[in-house]
Image (cartoon, rainbow, N blue to C red):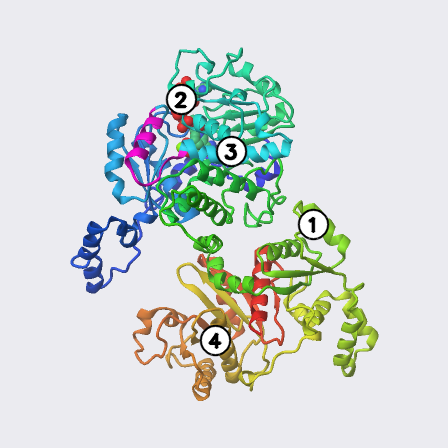
């Protein structure tokens, strides 16, 4: 089978054996339950279970709304099926639907941090099914119905919506409709069509199809322009065989009787039926630039290869993750429930669905982060025929869709706990699954409140341009790109995203400030072997020198660089214009400069590690100085420092020479009477693990250390390179600490987000100057 480059990038073609092995491996299935409270001691048991548990029970009995405060209800969704329409595989029964239901629960958790439970209900009787769900209702904050065939699914959903006071949402209907509508908005945009003129043919007249058609009609598609087909052909007015009230509502006057006849000249096709239902001949008969969403799972109505071979001008989407344009409800249900749960919506209504569809459509038109798809391989994702809908792994989805849904819930009056600050909600959501975003939230908020001018010294680099645009769009301030305007503008044009207002471009050679910067450098360097013309050349040609002059002379607040030069070369250029900062804390240190790296994980929070860049074998005075300044940075970033001086030994055991200088550093801090917790020397596990630290009751740390001072560069380097590869921790840094102006150097392999984070940290340091 041929594959397109975009497909290669994200392809995960798999075999049946691999899929079975994955499900059987280790603990069978895809789910387990985790505790959110400790259950280690007798006291824990008394609080969590008898007698303590009686208290929340009694409170909830008096006031049911308190269930949201004392139990998991508010973040807990039931994924319920009877297995009568498992994907496009037909009626496999309740038990055989369990892998899909476990999968949906896994997606809820992975993409929106919603906890779920699969409930496979073994009945095809509507009343029995409805009763099973309604009587289990108190446990849950929402009900996600899944893979229940039409027409029973319509009755079941309607009855449960009437009986229950929490959102009941049939994912195959509405989740699919929302995502398909988002894709259709963009496909129409790209092919120059208006929804009102769209001629759509839908194969399948079941759960997913009926809901898709209803939502599209609510969004402006004309009822007479939509033809539904099922196993008996076109659903025309007057047909009697295989009909029901839901099909009848969409029956139209038409001469067409078969799918092939209906498709002649059609603009768009929706497949929500079975594998292979659409032929190449049918595709050939469609109108100009046809839009084909072949959404049957696991195999589409037509493969993209077949569709493109028949009509190279088509836009094709499927429900699968191994082709571009995955129109699948995974882009919908996690985020729709996230937004609905967070405002305690009593239902999920039309306004919330349309808001979700529009936010998905708009997100696809923005610049795509590198971590979407496997970064680096293949061409970047750009809005166009091969990318009409966000990728399932797009980390921005959680911050975009739920706020749109929550807002629509509030505006349409179904939110029982409205929220005032939606922008703040979006930021909190961004941090919910991303340790970096979570760790940086207070920092980004502070920068937004105090926007800064930040020099992006390597302004012609594509990643830098993208980071600068993101910086501007995030409201962090004014990015100043150093580079040639024509080069930068052609990079922007190739990116296909608009350059927001308020980004400055400075060409070092042509800048009005050029002479002033050369004079400044000459003043500093004339007795160090530099002629004026050397300084002029440096300002003209070395963008790090030019950028550093801007910051040093107050033309900008901060600077970020590092992509095109090694750390030491970049630092050399910067040091031409910016001095290290000597303070009482740096007294006795070999140099005030050092590197501070942040390791961030959702479980352990943020840990600062130093020195990760400068001093190979720091002496005691240097270690002490590094500790004081690291503690200050940690505090500035909102962390009360607990500093551990690390070694291979803990409080004298085993003996060796290195711990001597570490112990001496601890003594120096005692002498200085610093205002933060510190202790050492100690092994890293003792520093981080309270159980081990309990062996040393005299230790002054009152909690796990969050600032780790390493005895040498080798240890710091190994630690910060190994941890992110062995755990889920992410890394920022090393931050340059000790310059008199905020300048940061990213690693040469840094991605857009890293550049953005470093720019934001540099801006944050500028706020605090
Ligand atoms: N990409 C996505 O996100 C999603 C995709 N889907 C896919 O959509 C399909 C339908 O799911 P769902 O609506 O839940 O199931 P339903 O059982 O509710 O509906 C199936 C419909 O398909 C019709 N159908 C079956 N075979 C054919 C055929 N050969 N030609 C024309 N019509 C046919 C049935 O016709 P009749 O009424 O005559 O029996 C019925 O109307 C599945 O493949 C499923 O995987 C569903 C949800 C989400
Ligand atoms: C994706 C999905 O829910 C289905 O195919 O049924
Ligand atoms: Mg489904």
| Residue to which mark 2 is pinned | 246
> Is disc 3 in contact with disc 1, using a CB cutoff of under 8 Å?
no
The residue lying toward the viewer, choosing from 334 and 107, is 334
Per the rendered image, the range of residues in magenta is: 152-171
Residue depicted at 63% across the width and 78% down the height? 580
| Left or right: residue 417 compared with residue 467 | left
| Residue to which mark 3 is pinned | 181
Q: Position of residue 584 (x, y in %)?
A: 55, 85
> Is disc 4 in contact with disc 2, using a CB cutoff of under 8 Å?
no
First reached walking from the N terminus: tag 3 or tag 1? 3
Question: Disc 3 or disc 1, which is closer to the eye?
Answer: 3
Residue depicted at 50% across the width and 84% down the height? 620
Location of residue 328 with respect to 274 vertically, above or below: below
| Residue to which mark 1 is pinned | 492
Query: Cβ(mark 4) to ligand 2 < 8 Å?
Result: no
| Residue to which mark 4 is pinned | 631
Q: Where in the image, quadrant-wise, is ligand 3 located?
A: top left
Q: Secondary structure at mark 4?
A: helix
Mark 3 to mark 4: distance in Å? 51 Å
Query: Cβ(mark 2) to ligand 1 < 8 Å?
Result: no
Mark 3 to mark 1: distance in Å? 29 Å
Q: Position of residue 574 (x, y in %)?
A: 68, 71
Q: Position of residue 342 (x, y in %)?
A: 39, 49
């Amino acid at each position: 089978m041929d594959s397109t480059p975009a497909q290669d990038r994200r392809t995960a073609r798999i075999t049946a054996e691999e899929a079975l092995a994955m499900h059987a491996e280790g603990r069978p299935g895809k789910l387990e339950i985790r505790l959110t409270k400790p259950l280690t001691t007798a006291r824990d048991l008394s609080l969590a279970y008898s007698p303590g548990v009686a208290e929340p029970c009694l409170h909830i009995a008096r006031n049911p709304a308190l269930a949201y405060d004392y139990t998991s209800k508010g973040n807990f969704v039931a994924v319920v099926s009877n297995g009568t329409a498992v994907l496009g595989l037909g009626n496999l029964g309740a038990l055989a639907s369990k892998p899909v239901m476990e999968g949906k629960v896994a997606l809820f958790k992975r993409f929106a941090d919603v906890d779920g439970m699969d409930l496979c209900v073994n009945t095809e009787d509507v009343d029995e099914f409805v009763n099973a769900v309604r009587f289990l209702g108190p446990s849950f904050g929402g009900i996600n119905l899944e893979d229940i065939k039409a027409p029973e699914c319509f009755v079941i959903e309607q009855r449960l919506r009437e009986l229950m006071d929490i959102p009941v949402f049939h994912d195959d209907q509405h989740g699919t409709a929302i995502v398909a509508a988002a894709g259709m908005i963009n496909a129409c945009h790209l092919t120059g069509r208006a929804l009102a003129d769209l001629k759509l043919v839908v194969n399948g007249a079941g759960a997913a199809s009926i809901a898709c058609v209803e939502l599209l009609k609510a969004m402006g598609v004309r009822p007479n322009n939509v033809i539904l087909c099922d196993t008996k052909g076109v659903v025309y007015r007057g047909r009697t065989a295989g009909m029901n009230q839901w099909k009848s509502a969409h029956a139209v006057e038409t001469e067409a009787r078969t799918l092939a006849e209906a498709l002649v000249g059609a603009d768009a096709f929706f497949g929500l039926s079975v594998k292979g239902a659409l032929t190449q001949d049918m595709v050939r008969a469609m109108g100009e630039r046809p839009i084909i969403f072949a959404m049957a799972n696991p195999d589409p109505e037509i493969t993209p290869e077949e569709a493109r071979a028949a009509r190279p001008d088509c836009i094709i989407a499927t429900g699968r993750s191994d082709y571009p344009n995955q129109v699948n409800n995974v882009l919908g249900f996690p985020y729709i429930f996230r937004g609905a749960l967070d405002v305690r919506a009593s239902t999920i209504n039309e306004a919330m669905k349309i808001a979700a569809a529009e936010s998905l459509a708009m997100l696809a038109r923005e610049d795509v982060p590198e971590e979407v798809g496997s970064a680096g391989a293949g061409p970047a994702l750009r809005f166009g025929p091969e990318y009409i809908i966000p990728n399932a792994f797009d980390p921005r989805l959680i911050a975009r869709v739920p706020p749109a849904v929550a807002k629509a819930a509030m505006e349409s009056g179904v939110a029982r706990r409205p929220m005032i600050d939606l922008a703040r909600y979006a930021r909190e959501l961004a941090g919910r699954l991303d340790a970096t975003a979570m760790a940086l939230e207070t920092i980004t908020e502070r920068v937004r409140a105090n926007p800064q001018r930040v020099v992006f010294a390597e302004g012609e680099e594509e990643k830098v341009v993208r980071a600068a645009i993101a910086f501007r769009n995030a409201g962090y301030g004014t990015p100043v790109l150093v580079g040639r305007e024509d080069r930068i503008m052609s990079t922007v044009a190739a990116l296909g995203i608009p350059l927001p207002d308020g980004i400055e471009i400075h060409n070092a050679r042509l800048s009005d400030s050029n002479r002033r910067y050369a004079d400044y450098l000459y003043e500093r360097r004339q007795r160090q072997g530099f002629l004026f013309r050397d300084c002029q050349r440096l300002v003209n040609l070395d963008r790090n020198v030019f950028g550093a002059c801007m910051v040093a002379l107050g033309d900008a607040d901060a600077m970020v660089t590092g992509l095109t030069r090694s750390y030491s070369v970049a630092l050399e250029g910067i040091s031409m214009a910016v001095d290290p900062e000597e303070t009482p804390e740096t007294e006795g240190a070999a140099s005030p400069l050092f590197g501070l790296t942040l390791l961030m994980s959702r479980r352990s929070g943020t840990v600062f590690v130093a020195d990760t860049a400068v001093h190979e074998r720091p002496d005691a005075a240097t270690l002490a100085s590094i500790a004081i300044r690291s503690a200050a940075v940690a505090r500035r970033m909102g962390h009360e420092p607990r500093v551990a001086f690390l070694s291979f030994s803990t409080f004298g055991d085993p003996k060796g020479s290195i711990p001597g200088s570490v112990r001496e550093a601890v003594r120096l801090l005692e002498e200085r009477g610093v205002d933060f917790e510190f202790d050492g020397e100690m092994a890293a596990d003792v520093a981080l693990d309270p159980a081990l630290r309990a062996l040393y009751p005299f230790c002054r740390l009152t909690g796990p250390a969050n600032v780790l001072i390493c005895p040498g560069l080798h240890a710091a380097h190994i630690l910060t390179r190994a941890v992110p590869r062995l755990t889920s921790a992410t890394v920022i840094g090393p931050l340059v600490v000790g310059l008199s102006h905020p300048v940061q150097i990213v690693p040469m392999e840094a991605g857009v987000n890293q550049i953005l984070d470093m720019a934001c940290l540099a801006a944050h340091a500028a706020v605090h100057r």
